[in-house]
Amino acid sequence: MTKVGWSFVETAARLLACGEREVVLGDLLESNESAWQALLDVFGLALRREAGFWKDPRPWVAGFGVALPSSFLLMGVSLSVCCTYQRLINHRVYDVWWPTGHEGFSLLLCHIFLLIAWSWAGGYLVGSVSRRTLWASTALCFLPSLICLGRFPLEALSKLCLFLFLLPATLGVRQGMRNVRISFRSAFLLALTVTVLMTSAWSSKALWILNWALIWPAWYLVATTWRSGEEGRSGSRPMHHATYTRLSLR
Amino acid sequence: MLGEFEYLLITAAAGLGEEAYGAAIREEIEATTGRKCSIGALYTTIDRLETKGLLKTRMGEATPQRGGRAKRMVRVTPKGVLAAKHFYDAVTRVSRGASWVANRTGSAS
């Protein structure tokens, strides 16, 4: 195999996990295959590994159950927060179809907190259950944004307003991927606060009915932290939520 | 019951004994069957068999021939031996009387 061919094979092998990459490259060197055949072998293995991840329901849940619908809903909330802020602070009046209504400062603060909490919890969930398929969840997250940017005129507002949710969501994804441990008490407190604030916004007619779907990542965190706490108490080795994920994705 | 490729892999690994690792198993399968064995099929099957408890793997030594890269050594477990035996028995039983079996009783040609 030529040096150039081998460098292509080594680059392609980056698609594989570190330990497996070394073994596979060693095997390919030993069998002295052509660069083209070695490339096909590496891509074939990477494809099989990727397909293997999708046999688990979790990447599907992360992509189609959280990333796609949440990003669509959170874009709406981001836009609503921006419009309300502009109306309250800069006294800018928008057309009737803009998502700003009668909210005052207290509801604006409530929406800002909810936006951060929803985004972070959704991001944490996606990061922890779909570490190896994060590229797909990210693509699904950006899909509604691309559609909205293409279809809706946003001259009155900066386009960045659509993406306010991305910062806390990215933080959540990073923490989910890094196995940042969350105590049951913190998870419960977060879910409870989100529920109370959502109920309050709902009673003030300041919450879209579909936004209730954004509550489940927070309660999912409560369930998983409770489960890992139960296992710790029952004497078995306490396992972090992300460890379950890693094992299930192997 | 094992699949055909799973059986081939276990048999090749058992035959190689202490020298069973990815590249050697692959070479053995290709030499005995005359079929191409892709690295993808090999390693995903090794993983599957290891999950079922039919194989055990460990990282072996690195050799200069492999550019200083480690081997993934494979060992067939007693459960794997039993599963391969069951597969072989089933194939032998089902093949009894088949026209392509050389020493079958009452063979036509």
Image (spheres, coloured by chain):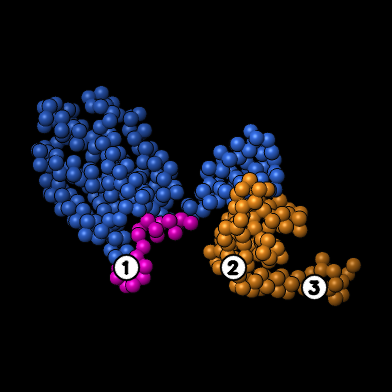
Q: Disc 3 designates what residue? A: B97
Where does the image place residue A211, in percent across and percent down from the top left?
24, 46
Instruction: Name the residue located 70 percent from the left edge and 44 percent from the top edge.
Output: A32
| Position of A143 relative to B83 (above/below) | above
In this orientation, which residue lies closer to the viewer: A106 or A237?
A237
Instruction: Name the residue located 85 percent from the left edge and 76 percent from the top edge.
Output: B105
Q: Which chain is blue?
A: A
10 Å crowding of disc 1: few (<14), some (14-19), many (20+): some
Q: What amino acid is found at the position of numbered circle 2 in the picture?
A: Leu
Q: Read off the chain for label 1.
A: A
The quadrant in which the N terminus of chain A is found is top right
Q: CA distance from mark 1 to mark 2?
A: 31 Å
Instruction: Give the number of the disc on residue A195.
Output: none
Q: Which chain is orange?
A: B
Where does the image place residue A17, in percent across and percent down from the top left?
51, 49
| Position of A100 relative to A54 (above/below) | above
Q: Secondary structure at mark 2?
A: loop
In this orientation, which residue lies closer to the viewer: B20 or B52?
B20
Task: Single out the mark in the foreground, 3 or 1.
Answer: 1
Q: What amino acid is found at the position of numbered circle 3 in the picture?
A: Gly
Dividing the picture into quadrants, the one containing residue A40 is top right
- Magenta includes A17? no
Q: Disc 2 designates what residue? A: B54
